[in-house]
């Protein structure tokens, strides 16, 4: 109930009015049954705008820190996250991360939509980073299709450190579902997990038009924080796309100029 109140009565109408989000490919989301929505991650507001594009409820994984804040703001944030069904995950990995994945599997087995950011954290610079294999494990263990998603412009609206997003159009591009049933039962093969993850990331890259960096976003953030050279500079040769493939010949999607503002939700 809280989810739909926020989407249709309180937050959703305001976001639609102010940011005029545009959507392409919403028809690719299955009308029923479990499915994984795997998206790039550019800003905190990604988890607000993607649900606006869908008629179905979607549940995300969220970092544990959203649930442990202090003071009024911390309690309000934790209450909101719980209200919309966000699943807390300890990004340090281990048993806590495993528990979050199990919760996702349960969500999928119940026929729901489960949203995940394979990069594991927000991109520090708007580029697409190496995907973690948790999304592949979810796909292979659940048998659910993976729907690739590209958020467009959220990093410009809300760059790192900015709380209130600036007013501009936000885009969501949704691709055709990916079927990995051919790998069912191979979820413990790390090479298969990496291959599936790279295929998912390639699909996201093809939708978003982002430049790819073949390191984890968390590693890149650590390098930047400690003053080390960031990966992916011109002097460092890295694969142009996930899995060592050539980069797809695509550009960053742009808002439609000849259409009325998209009505979503």
Image (cartoon, rainbow, N blue to C red):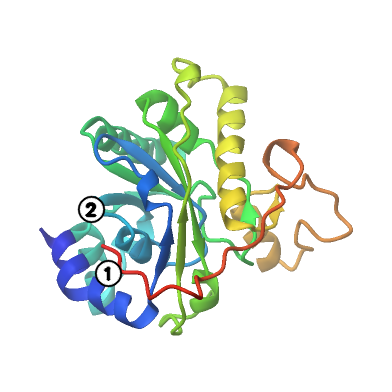
Q: Nearer the viewer, residue 145 or 257?
A: 257
Above/below status of 111 relative to 162: above
- Mark drawn on residue 77: 1
How many marks the image carries: the answer is: 2
Q: Which of 4 and 159 is in front in this view?
A: 4
Element assignment for label 1: helix
User: Are dots 1 and 2 in contact, CB under 8 Å?
Assistant: no
Above/below status of 262 relative to 214: below
205 to the left or right of 229? left
Quarter of the rendering containing residue 236: bottom right
Q: Which residue occupies 26% across, 41% down?
A: 31
Q: Residue lying farthest top?
A: 185
Quarter of the rendering containing residue 172: bottom left
Q: Where is residue 33 in the image (x, y as percent from the top left)?
A: 25, 34
Element assignment for label 2: loop
Residue that mark 2 sits on: 85
Q: Which residue occupies 18% across, 68% down?
A: 8
Q: Position of residue 19 (x, y in %)?
A: 39, 78
Q: Residue lying farthest front?
A: 258
- Mark drawn on residue 193: none
Looking at the rendered image, the quarter that the N terminus falls into is bottom left
Above/below status of 70 relative to 94: below
Q: Nearer the viewer, residue 80 or 173?
A: 173
Q: Where is residue 84 in the image (x, y as percent from the top left)?
A: 22, 58
246 to the left or right of 200? right
Above/below status of 62 relative to 136: below
196 to the left or right of 56? right
Q: Where is residue 14 in the image (x, y as percent from the top left)?
A: 26, 79
């Amino acid at each position: 109930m809280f989810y739909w109140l926020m989407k249709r009565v309180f937050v959703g109408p305001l976001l639609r009015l102010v940011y005029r989000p545009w959507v392409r490919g919403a028809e690719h989301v299955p009308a029923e049954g479990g499915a994984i929505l795997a998206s790039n991650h550019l800003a905190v507001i990604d988890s607000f705008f993607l649900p606006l594009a869908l008629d179905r409820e979607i549940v995300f994984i969220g970092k544990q820190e959203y649930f442990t804040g202090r003071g009024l703001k911390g309690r309000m944030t934790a209450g909101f996250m719980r209200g919309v069904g966000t699943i807390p995950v300890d990004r340090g990995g281990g048993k806590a991360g495993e528990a979050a994945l199990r919760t996702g599997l349960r969500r999928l087995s119940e026929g729901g939509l489960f949203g995940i950011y394979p990069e594991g954290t927000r991109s520090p610079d708007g580029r697409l980073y190496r995907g973690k294999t948790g999304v592949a494990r979810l796909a292979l263990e659940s048998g659910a299709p993976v729907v690739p998603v590209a958020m467009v412009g959220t990093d410009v609206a809300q760059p790192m450190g900015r709380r209130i997003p600036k007013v501009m159009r936000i885009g969501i591009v949704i691709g055709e579902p990916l079927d990995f049933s051919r790998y069912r039962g191979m979820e413990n093969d790390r090479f298969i997990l990496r291959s599936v993850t790279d295929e998912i990331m390639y699909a996201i890259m093809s939708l978003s038009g982002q430049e790819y960096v073949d390191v984890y976003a968390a590693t890149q953030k650590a390098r930047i924080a400690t003053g080390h050279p960031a990966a992916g500079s011109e002097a460092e040769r890295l694969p142009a796309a996930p899995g060592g493939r050539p980069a797809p010949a695509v550009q960053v999607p742009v808002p439609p100029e000849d259409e009325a503002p998209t009505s979503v939700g």
